[in-house]
Amino acid sequence: MESIRLKELKNHYGEEVVVSGFIDNIRNLQWVQFLVIRDDSGKVQITIEKSEEKNKEMVELVNHLTLESTVKITGTLMEAPKVKLNGMEIIPSKIEVTSHSEDELPFTYKDLSLVNLDTRLDYRFIDLRNESNGFIFKVQSCLVRYMREYLYLHDFTEIHTPKFIGTASESGSDVFEVKYFDRKAYLAQSPQFYKQMAMAAGFNRIFEVAPAFRAENSNTSRHATEFTSFDVEFSYIDSYFDVMKLQEEMIQYAFQKVHDLYGDKIKELYGVEVVVPSVPFPVMKLSDVYQELEERYNYHVDDSEKTDLTTEAERLCYQLSKDKFQHEFLFVIDYPAEKRAFYHMRDKDGKLQGYDLLWRGVEITTGAQREHRYAEIKKAALEKGLDKDVEFYLEFFKYGCPPHGGFGMGVDRLTMLLLGIPSVKETQFLFRGPNRLNP
């Protein structure tokens, strides 16, 4: 018989079942032994009567069993209204120890209040046994699944682009250099160039969920040197507002699914509500944002800083959006063109055709209409001094390329904000930062 996941047991009352999991608790009383085993879907109680001769071998085995060992148990599932754990119990006929936990755990994962985060990350395989920490990745998986589903429903194709690149081309900085046989290579900061190559290839609508790498020596709660990026690009748009519309609808769709499937559990474990946003999201010009921040919250910065949002301005935008629009999200547009990548389109007046999306006081996306005209994008690259570095990229636009645009979002940061978790270190399965390469 195959093992049944514990959440499925309710369909098997009165049947012989096989279950597998970690030993979560042991109570060894005078006349009875109770085990609680767990898998990633739930827990169940195992009850062994010591007085029954047939149980003698199992009783002796349990006498030497340690917490966090793993077992495979065959037995009969019974309804047991007096059992607090789901009103059921398994009466075992066979217990097999599949692994033995040798030593005392480095910390008590059920109560992490006094455990240093670095210690937890050193023993991440123990840390993730904590219910709240493990559940983060069920939520993250759900979020990504339904953003994907939205795109599939709208005829997008998922692609996979290379992470080794031949030139440090997107910005010329903040890239990891690696030895690639007899020459240098770099880890890709994003799939941006290859997304646009797909547009030139006539794919029209594509997306990718994949790692991205940033060689930034940033030790903040929001940054990592490797993260999972959710990237979207599509053709035949009229303006970057088409990109904004698709993104807000995708987010709304996925958040509704997360709310319906996990909203109650998220409230229980993290104390936050999953707020499904209404569409359209509010939109403000960058200059208007700073004016409102001054008038409403007395927040002043020098004019030289108003070419982008400061970290504090981002934080205040959460309150601004709630006060002004009763909304958690805010699109900010009209950034100075010189502050953005050369492949972002400018209109005839030189105005940037792009945006940032802020949520709960943090920037989660930079999106834009891209420059698709060969002469214009070549000129923009030259102005940035990137001519030779991006020769391969400029080739994409020489033989026709439709108007297009797109965006990218960090999955780890999005999860952090959704669950109200203080650091992206906890929403990555294994965090990578300037000072961490292990485990």
Image (cartoon, rainbow, N blue to C red):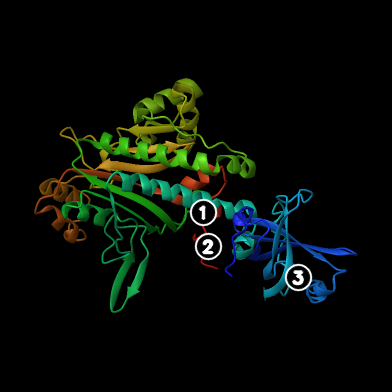
On the image, numbered disc 2 is attached to which residue?
435
**336 sits left or right of 39 in the view:** left
Residue identifier under label 3: 66
Quarter of the picture holding the C terminus:
bottom right
Vertically, is 74 above or below 38? Answer: below
Spot occupied by residue 248 in the image (x, y as percentages of width and height) = 37, 36
What crowding class fits label 1: few (fewer than 14 Cα within 10 Å), some (14-19), or many (20 or more)? few
Residue name at image x 37 percent, y 64 percent: 176
Q: Quadrant of residue 266?
A: top right
Residue placed most toward the observer, 233 or 116: 233
CA distance separating discs 1 and 2: 9 Å
Most foreground residue, 161 or 352: 161
Q: Nearer the viewer, mark 2 or mark 3?
A: 3
**343 versus 388 height, above or below:** above
Q: Position of residue 265 (x, y in %)?
A: 60, 43
In this view, 150 is above or below 133: above
Residue farthest to the bottom?
182
Q: Given this view, does label 1 or label 3 mark the residue nearer the observer?
A: 3
**Nearest the camera: 149 or 118?**
149
The numbered mark, 1 or 3, whose residue comes first in the sequence reads 3
Work out whether residue 150 can be spotted.
yes
